Amino acid sequence: MKKIFLFLATSLIITIAFGCSKDNVAPSFSKFNQTKKPVNLVATFFKNSVAKTDSIRLTWDMQDTTSVTNYLVSWSDSSDFDYGNVRQAYINNLNTTYTLQTTNVLKSMGYTTVPDTLLHIVYFTVSALYNNADLVNFAGPRAVIDTATVNWK
Amino acid sequence: MLKAVAITWLSVLLFFSSMGVTFAQNESSFVRAATVSKREAVVLSVLFPGLGQMTVGQKVKGVSFFLAGVASLAVFVNSNEDYKTKLDTYNRDKTILSDMATAGRKNYEDALKSYSNLEKQNNTLDDLHSTRNAALVCAAVVYAYNIFDVLFFTPSSNESQKSEIRKNVIVESALVDRKPGILVSTRF
């Protein structure tokens, strides 16, 4: 009887100790929280009818550039950014100005001919790319989206 | 570990059940097994809640203990397995989130989605952990109370009980060309 009690008590203690330990630890987002988003993003369309080189100029500000190595510019044809034709371009410097050729922007989203609507809205955003001990080529949060209205004609 | 304990426990239970059937095939042995002493009842209750009470004739109490024990163990085993399975998925997704920082060409928005998903999974795991512990505590309480009951509230088999059981068994066995299963049910 005593042996049975001892066996069961030991089994119960071992079961509780090893079988029921809480093994899940809450996830941490601290690595990613050190990233900042660019501010004051402005996208401006420039019409150049003579040279037929229309362009879109993007400017933004980045106050804290610690660990920022370059920027990632993204554009989409949808106000719900991720659900549109999203394209990206990496900028290999820390300049806060970038100019895109309108034709290239539109072609990249699949528009090869003049659409029915002469005016076309393109949504732009920019992210800072971080490189340090914790992050490798990691694109930080996106800047508030700005639009450029492209005039085809 | 838990499975091993459960399997061992069930094996012991099955072994004793089969012994009961063997006893039942010999009438004199069966009568002897039916008139269990308090010590034997305690041993049976130690093996599984309610068995001791059932063997001394406290059928309702015995069945209640037995069902409570089975139910709490079933909930415990189920939530434990669920917890382990979901924990594997959670750990895998957690590694993916951690790797996003150094994998290159990953972005904050995807990391945020992954983190939100992980938080939900973590909450689910916390709930499962609570359920599992509650079921285990229930099983332990049922088990402890079952032992307490069989030690202090279960009457020991006296001679009148023995004769009554003996008479019942003899009458029953005379009626039918019985099978082991019928005799076992008569016993409880």
Image (cartoon, rainbow, N blue to C red):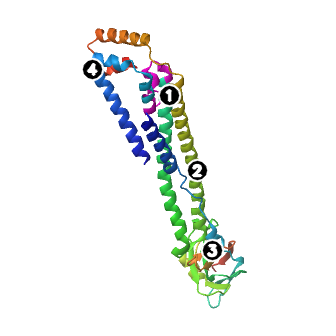
> Picture coordinates of residue B31 (x, y %)?
33, 16
Whether residues under marks 3 and 1 lie with C-beta atoms below 8 angstroms apart, the answer is no
Whether residues under marks 4 and 2 lie with C-beta atoms below 8 angstroms apart, the answer is no
Specify whether B54 is left or right of A119: left
Tag 1 residue: B65
Q: Residue furthest bottom?
A: A51
Q: Earlier in the sequence, mark 4 or mark 1?
A: 4
How many residues crowd mark 3 within 10 Å: few (<14), some (14–19), many (20+)?
many
| Distance Cα–Cα, label 3 vs label 1 | 59 Å
Q: Residue at x 28, y 25 (%)?
A: B22
Q: Magenta span covers which residues?
A: B44-61
Q: Give the label on residue A6, or none.
A: none
* Type of amino acid under label 3: Gly
Discs 4 and 2 carry the same chain letter: yes
| Distance Cα–Cα, label 3 vs label 4 | 78 Å
Taking depth in this image into account, of A98 and B100 the one nearest to the observer is B100
- Pair 2/1: label in front: 1
Tag 4 residue: B25
> Picture coordinates of residue B23 (x, y %)?
30, 22
Q: Is residue B164 above or below residue B88?
A: above
Q: Quadrant of the C terminus of chain A?
A: bottom right
> Picture coordinates of residue B151 (x, y %)?
51, 26
Dot 2: element: helix
* Type of amino acid under label 2: Asp
Task: Name the chain letter of the residue that bears numbered label 3.
Answer: A
Tag 3 residue: A140
Dot 1: element: helix
Residue A77 visible within the image: no
Dot 4: element: helix
Specify whether B99 is left or right of B172: right
